[in-house]
Image (cartoon, rainbow, N blue to C red):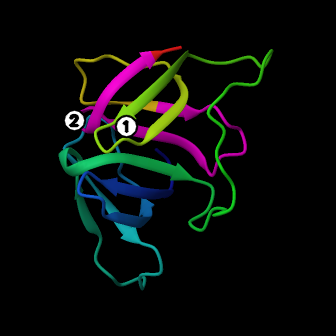
Amino acid sequence: MTGPAKIVVRYQNGSMLKGYAQDFSPGAQYFHVKAEGAKTSAPLMRVIMQELKAVFFVRDFVGNGSYTEGKSFVAGKPLSGRKVEVTFQDGELLVGTTTGYDSTRPGFFLFPADDRSNNVRMYVVAKAVKGVRFL
């Protein structure tokens, strides 16, 4: 990655962290986050990948609470990757495309089906997934 990425980290225990990550790598065991609103001199927080549900790369931290993200694809729109539905252990469902799903890997990137989503892309941690279904 180049430059800090605006992210929302969702832990398997339900907690959340909003901030900026510069050293995120899907193959790493951990990465560091500067919490949203933290002073420049504040220390970075270490985030352990295996404790996570997913990392959401977002347009903004607020989002639109009244918007319901679509779970279907626009007919005729060109897509990159395979259409997939991801169900997490906690019951949350995400729909999007992926080019890198492999059940033996620790996780994979997912691009939302809804172009108006606040999420640009998500890194899904395999340990937090109940099921993956190709559409």
- Indicate left or right for 97 with 133 as reference: right
Q: Amino acid at mark 1?
A: Val
**Residue at the image position 47 percent from the left and 57 percent from the top:** 7
- The residue sitting at the right extreme is 76
Nearer to me, 23 or 78? 78
- Indicate left or right for 94 with 12 as reference: right
- Indicate left or right for 79 with 75 as reference: left
Q: Position of residue 40 (x, y in %)?
A: 42, 82
Q: Would you say residue 107 sits in the magenta stretch?
A: no
Kindly state the secondary structure of the residue where label 1 is placed.
strand
> Which mark, by number, is residue 124?
1
Quadrant in which residue 34 is drawn: bottom left
**Highlighted range, magenta:** 110-133
Q: Would you say residue 122 sits in the magenta stretch?
A: yes
> Which mark, by number, is residue 80?
none
Q: Which residue is mark 2?
A: 127
From what the image shows, is residue 20 above or below residue 1? below
Nearer to me, 70 or 63? 70
- The residue sitting at the front extreme is 91
